[in-house]
Image (cartoon, rainbow, N blue to C red):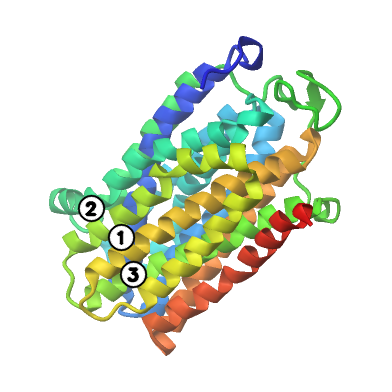
Amino acid sequence: MNRPAAMVHPAQRRVLSVLVCTQVFGAAGVGLGVAVAVLVTTSLSESTVVGGLGATATALGAAGLALVVATLSTRYGRRRALLVAYATGAFGGAVAALAVQLRSWPLLLAALVPFGGGTSATLAARFAATDLAAPAHRASTLSTVVWSTTLGAVAGPNLVEPATRFAGDGGPFLLAAAVFALAAAGIALGLRADPLMPVGTVPAAIGDSCCGVTGSAIPAEPVRWSMLRVLSPSARLALLGVTLCNTAMVGMMSMTPVQMQHTGSSLTVVGVVISLHVAAMYAGSPLFGWLADRLGRMPVLAVGAALVVAAAGVCGMADSHEAPQLAVGMAVLGAGWSAGVVAGSALLTESVPAPLRQAAQGLSDLLMNAGGALGGLAAGVVVQAWSYPALGLLLGFLALPVLMASVLTTLRPAR
């Protein structure tokens, strides 16, 4: 559907094009790390618990960088913020490759923290897409950037084997560093029409009436924890939704490759399953964005939570030789994550006034990645102490509060 000319900011098309192109490279780097971080850490340390820390370290790095990205965005615009995040990810990838070469899992865990900068950049790009978007199309515009992640995210895990053959066990991290560097170059050269310029201001989206203004620059607030006290109930539910959906997704995804390898699946099969999961995370996002714009954010958030609960059950009930069932479960998990993040991010953006948006978005990514870090850590402990099915049961229950809250909020106006 074409938008009226008055609803399209002159710079929006160029900004969106640059974000879409660089997202492909960034997603490939993240996909490479996701596919091997836990496996390599487990192999070097010979411990499932330490292996779970591979996902935790990356998520912690992404959480820390989320605040840096939000602060830099507020002060200097999206371009510098994304550039710093991608450059940090490239540095982490290079050090991770060195750590694997040295057979040092402590150095690998340390390197995976800055490696999380790539994740932080790909997440922040979805909010950058909404800066100049009309309010009625925010979810669809956001989902366009999420969808563009599909190609790189699917390609990444499938590049693990050739990268390993070419450069040894550290090859995937080395390749990830290279593609993060390409993404940084694309941002540096292409994102000249910064959606948050002039420096230190946030342009109100065209037609945005959140703060009673239209199309003018509004002084931006810095990132502060105190803003949690002033957020509306819908903004808090959005934060809860994206956090718990991401926690469940990272927890299940971090241990699924280990589970499959322990039960005899080849690295190729593991790569296919993870690729299906990642494809489901991103490929369906335009549908969820379209639904969120037309049906509302809350119903789609409820769908996302329901899919996460279902996926945890499907994966948890798979036996030792059920790679197809795990593939289905991981695909459903990816779709649930997509619905939750797209609807939750759009709900958050429209639920806070423009001066608070950068802080709210940074807080969202901080909580989202902190939840992922906790999910990765807890997953390793649960599998080590109990079993993979126990992990599925735990993560399924984790998403239930979001499901119930979003359903109740959706039904309340009808009473």
Q: Nearer the viewer, mark 3 or mark 2?
A: 3
Q: Nearer the viewer, residue 296 or 50?
A: 296
Give the residue at mark 1: 36
On screen, 273 above or below 351? below
Is residue 44 at least partly visible in the picture? Answer: no
- Quarter of the figure with the C terminus: bottom right
Q: Amino acid at mark 1?
A: Val
Q: Which mark is residue 160?
A: 2
Q: Nearer the viewer, residue 414 or 81?
A: 414
Q: Quadrant of residue 409?
A: bottom right
Q: Quadrant of residue 24?
A: top left
Residue found at the very far front of the displayed protein: 415
Nearer-N-terminus badge (3/1)? 1
Q: Quadrant of residue 106?
A: bottom left
Q: Nearer the viewer, residue 347 or 275?
A: 347
Q: Amino acid at mark 2?
A: Val
Give the residue at mark 3: 256
